[in-house]
Image (tube, coloured by chain):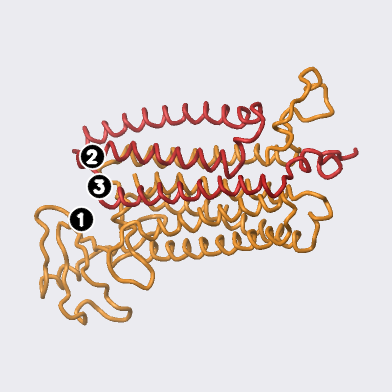
Chain colours: A orange, B red
Amino acid sequence: MAGQASQAIDKTELWSGGQSPFSVSYGKMMMWFFLVSDALTFSGLLVAYGYARHAYTAQWPIGEQVFHAMPFLHGHFPLLYVALMTFILIISSVTMVLAVEAGHRMDEKGVIKWLGLTIVGGFFFLGSQAWEWSHFIHGTPGYIVTPNNAQYYLVEEIPHGMTAADVEGFALIQGKGTENETTISGQQALDIYESHVQHVQGANLIINEYGPPQYGNFFFFITGFHGFHVFSGVIINIIIWSGVIRGVYRRRGHYEMIEKTGLYWHFVDLVWVFVFTFFYLI
Amino acid sequence: MERDDLIVNDSYSVAANHDEEHGKQIRKKIYFVTVLLSVITTAEVLLGVYIKQGTTWWTAVKMGFIIMTLVKAFYIVAVFMHLGDERKSLRYVIILPYAVFIIYLLFIGITESNYLNDVWRQFRP
C-alpha cells in the first residue's frame, strides 16, 4: 500500500525531474488537489451554516426535534434515521477500502465484489436522502398565522378536499412549547382557523415550519450538494466497475483507478461525518 | 506532446501492489477503524438524544461532538484514504494550506456571529 512512498530516494535527484517528489502518480496527486478544493467549498458552506446558527441561537431549531421520523413506523425516533444514513455511508466506505486493498493484490473477483457492494450502499444512501427530503418538505400538520400575527399549531392535518369543519374534534394549540400552552377546540378553533392568513407546513426555499428561512435553505443546499456528490460518486463507481469487469485494469497491471475513485468516495463519507455533527447534532 | 503521466509511467502505481500477507495486516487495520467509527457514531447519537441542548452538560457534550468528529475524520483520512502511508511532503501539501485557511475562516465566522448574536439580544429581546 505504501509503495514507493516508503522507499528511500536520492534527495539531490528529487527536484530535478524524472520522478515525482511525492512518489505518487500524476492522477492520484490531482485527485488529492481536487479534494482539497472541494473540501474548501464544503467548509465554506458549513462555516456559513455555523455563522447563521450561532447568530440566531434563540430562533434556530434543534436537530433532534426536527428529524425524528422513521419510514413505515409511527412514533418518535430522534436522530435515528440520520444515524442509519451515517452507518450506510460508513459501511460503503469500508467496502470501498476493501476494494482498493483487493486491487493491490490484483484480486479481480474481490474488487468486483467489494466495489459492487459500495455501489449498492451508495444507492441506499441516495434513497434514504430522497425520503428525508420528502419528509422535510411535507412536514407535520404545521401552523396557521392569524391577522394579528399569532401562531396556532394544527393538531391534525386536514385531509385533502376537506375543510376544518369536516374534521372530527378539530383543535389548535396556542403557544406551543411555552409554559402557557393551551389547546383550543370546538367552534372557537374553527373561527380562528377561518381567519387565518397563512398556513405554514413543511419547508420550501421561502418559508418553513421549523425555524428561520435560512434553516430550510441551508438544509437543502448542504445536504443537496452532498447528495449530488454521492450521486456523481455512484456514477463514477459504476463506470470504473464496468472497467474492472471488462479487465481494463488487469491488462494495465495495477488497479490504481480504484484507489482514485476510492479517494473521492471516502471524501464524500468524510463530508457526511461533518454534516452529521454540525447540522444534526449541534 | 507525449503524455507520460497516465499509463506509460506507472511505476508508482505498480509499486503500490502488495502480497497476501501484507494485505491481511491492512484488512485488520480496516476492520479496527470500522469498529471505531461505528462506536463513535453510536456514542454521538446517544449523547445527542439524551443530553438536551441548553442543559448543564451541553457545552461539554458539544465539545465532545467536535472532538469525536475530528477523531473520525483523522481515521478516515489517514487509513481509508491512505494519507498516513504517503510521503511526508504530500501529507503537508494536502493538510497545511487547508488547515491554515479553515482555522482563519472559523475564527472570523465565530467572532462575527458572536457580535451579531449580541446585537440581536439587545435590539430584539
- Sequence-first disc among 2 and 3: 3
Q: How crowded is mark 3: few (under 14 residues within 10 Å), some or many (20 or more)?
A: some
Q: Which residue is drawn at 77% across and 40% down?
A: B15
Q: Give the distance between the C-alpha atoms of the residues marked 3 and 1, in whole angstroms.
A: 33 Å
**Quick one: label 2, few (<14), some, or many (20+) residues within 10 Å?**
few
In the rendered image, residue A23, in percent from the top left (x then y), is placed at 74, 32
- Name the side, left or right, on which A86 lies relative to A2: left
The CA distance from mark 2 to mark 3 is 7 Å
Q: Which residue is tagged 3?
A: B51
Please state which of residues A188 and A209 is positioned toward the viewer in this rendering.
Answer: A209
Q: How crowded is mark 1: few (under 14 residues within 10 Å), some or many (20 or more)?
A: few
Q: Nearer the viewer, residue B106 or A241?
A: A241
Residue at the disc numbered 1 = A149
State the SS at label 1. loop
Q: Name the residue under label 2.
A: B57
Q: Where is residue A270 in the image (x, y as percent from the top left)?
A: 52, 45
What's the distance in space between the residues labelled 2 and 1, CA to CA? 36 Å
Question: Label 1 amino acid?
Answer: Asn
Where residue B90 sits in the image (x, y, percent)?
66, 30
Q: Quadrant of the N terminus of chain A?
A: top right
Mark 2, secondary structure of its residue: loop
Q: Are marks 2 and 3 on the same chain?
A: yes
